[in-house]
Image: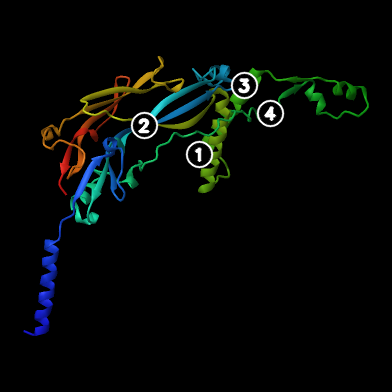
């Protein structure tokens, strides 16, 4: 064994002895709400606060009656078509979620000696989001209410494939009439009579029936020349589109707009049951305030499962200048969303406010 090797072993042994004898990092933790001061160079951390997020997706359908709605039954045997403009609101989906924010009642100042990696317990709490450093104080999830597109006026353009007027003596008009004659002057003074609404409706209904006949003959292959492949598909699509436009003259048009609203609720501390009306919802008015009388209530119910009751009294009393890290273990809550008396969503979710405050010696 060489002297050089023995010298290296002695050096490494000495280093290990110095490290083993070096003093461990120390901390002192106090609530800034109590001390009203923050020491220079200290770390700030907070306990998380659970916020319940309820996101609601709704549809607003505007129904505009067609100009020929009163003749739908007479000429097309379609009953109960809308006769007046109205709106119909429906809830398409409700989602229950949560996010964490800083709890203003539990913001701590931590004075320490040594680097943060000398306290593996603190790093584990950070990784599990049981405590928050300032960079994570704001919520990480963005919630918003959508602004639907502007609702344009609804117009009916394809009212007929024929002229809008009946002209007297139309048979004479198509005949050969010499200019400047008495007959020519009489025809120039002939009054064009506007077709009645029922006459227009009848013509539109006859056109719909003709379209259906043409489509049937096209599908049945009764024409001498038949489109093939994509041409056939496009021809049928165009016929369907034209029929839909003409049917809307009788059945009306519908315009659908999508709405998204997010509601937030902060559960209380040490509460076993909570129930509140988030908002009210009307089939004709949509979203309404919780204080309104009309519409059905949309309720949020939270029930504490009390899974952490065994931790009562485990941690020592919390005071200023503690030598340990203070954190909180969330408890499990059973959440329900009701639309009137109907259960829409239910889930188990962790809620920090329902849990217990404990301590960790780093």
SS label for mark 3: helix
Q: Secondary structure at mark 4?
A: loop
Image location of residue 219, percent across then percent down: 50, 39
Residue 217: x and y in percent read: 53, 36
Q: Residue furthest top?
A: 293
Foreground pick, 301 / 246 = 301
Return the residue at label 1. Answer: 219
| Secondary structure category for the residue under label 1 | helix
- Quarter of the image where one finds residue 114: bottom left
Q: Secondary structure at mark 2?
A: strand
* Residue 72 falls in image quadrant: top right
Foreground pick, 206 / 359: 359
Which circle marks residue 162 in the picture? 4
The earlier-in-sequence mark between 1 and 3 is: 3
Q: How far apart are the alpha carbons under marks 2 and 1? A: 40 Å
User: Which-is-in-front pick, marks 2 and 1?
Assistant: 2
Say if mark 4 contacts mark 1, CB within 8 Å: no
Instruction: Answer with mark 4 or mark 1, whichever residue precedes in sequence.
Output: 4
- Circle nearer the viewer, 1 or 3: 3
Q: Residues within 10 Å of mark 3 (few under 14, many from 20)?
A: some
User: Foreground residue, 31 or 70?
Assistant: 31
Quarter of the figure that contains the N terminus: bottom left
- Farthest-out residue, right: 180
User: How far separated are the C-alphas under marks 4 and 2?
Assistant: 46 Å
Which of the labelled discs sits on residue 202, or is there none?
3
- The residues bearing labels 4 and 3 have C-alpha atoms spaced at a distance of 12 Å
85 sits left or right of 140 in the view:
right
The residue singled out by tag 2 in the image is 93
Q: Give the x, y percent position of residue 204.
A: 61, 25
Residue located at (80% from left, 19% from top) = 191
Q: Nearer the viewer, residue 282 or 85?
A: 282
């Amino acid at each position: 064994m060489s002297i050089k090797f023995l010298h290296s072993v002695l050096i490494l042994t000495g280093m290990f002895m110095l490290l083993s004898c070096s003093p461990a990092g120390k901390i002192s933790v106090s609530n800034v709400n109590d001390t009203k001061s923050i020491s220079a160079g200290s770390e700030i951390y907070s306990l998380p606060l659970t916020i319940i997020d309820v996101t609601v997706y709704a549809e607003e359908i505007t129904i505009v009656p067609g100009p020929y709605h009163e003749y739908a039954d007479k000429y097309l045997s379609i009953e109960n078509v809308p006769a007046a403009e109205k709106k119909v609101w429906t809830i398409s989906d409700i989602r229950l979620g949560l996010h964490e924010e800083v709890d203003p009642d539990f913001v701590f100042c931590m004075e320490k000696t040594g680097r943060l990696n000398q306290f593996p317990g603190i790093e584990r709490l950070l990784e599990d989001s049981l405590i928050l450093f300032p960079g994570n104080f704001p919520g990480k999830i963005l919630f918003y209410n959508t602004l639907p597109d502007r609702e344009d006026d609804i117009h009916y353009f394809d009212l007929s494939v024929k002229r809008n007027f009946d002209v007297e003596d139309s048979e004479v008009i198509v005949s050969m009439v010499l200019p400047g004659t008495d007959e020519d002057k009489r025809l120039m003074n002939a009054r064009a009579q506007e077709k009645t609404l029922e006459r227009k409706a009848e013509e539109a209904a006859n056109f719909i029936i003709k379209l259906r006949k043409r489509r049937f003959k096209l599908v049945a292959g009764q024409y001498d020349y038949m489109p093939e492949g994509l041409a056939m598909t496009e021809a049928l699509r165009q016929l369907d589109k034209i029929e839909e436009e003409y049917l809307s003259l009788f059945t009306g048009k519908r315009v659908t707009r999508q709405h998204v609203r997010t509601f937030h609720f902060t559960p209380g501390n040490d509460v076993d049951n909570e129930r509140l009306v988030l908002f009210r919802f009307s089939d004709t008015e949509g979203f309404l305030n919780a204080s309104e009388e009309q519409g059905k209530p949309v309720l949020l119910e939270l029930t504490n499962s009390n899974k952490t009751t065994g931790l009562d009294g485990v941690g020592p009393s919390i005071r200023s200048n503690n030598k340990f890290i203070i954190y909180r273990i969330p408890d499990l809550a059973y959440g329900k969303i009701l639309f009137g008396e109907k259960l829409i969503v239910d889930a188990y979710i962790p809620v920090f406010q329902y849990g217990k405050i404990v301590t960790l010696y780093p």
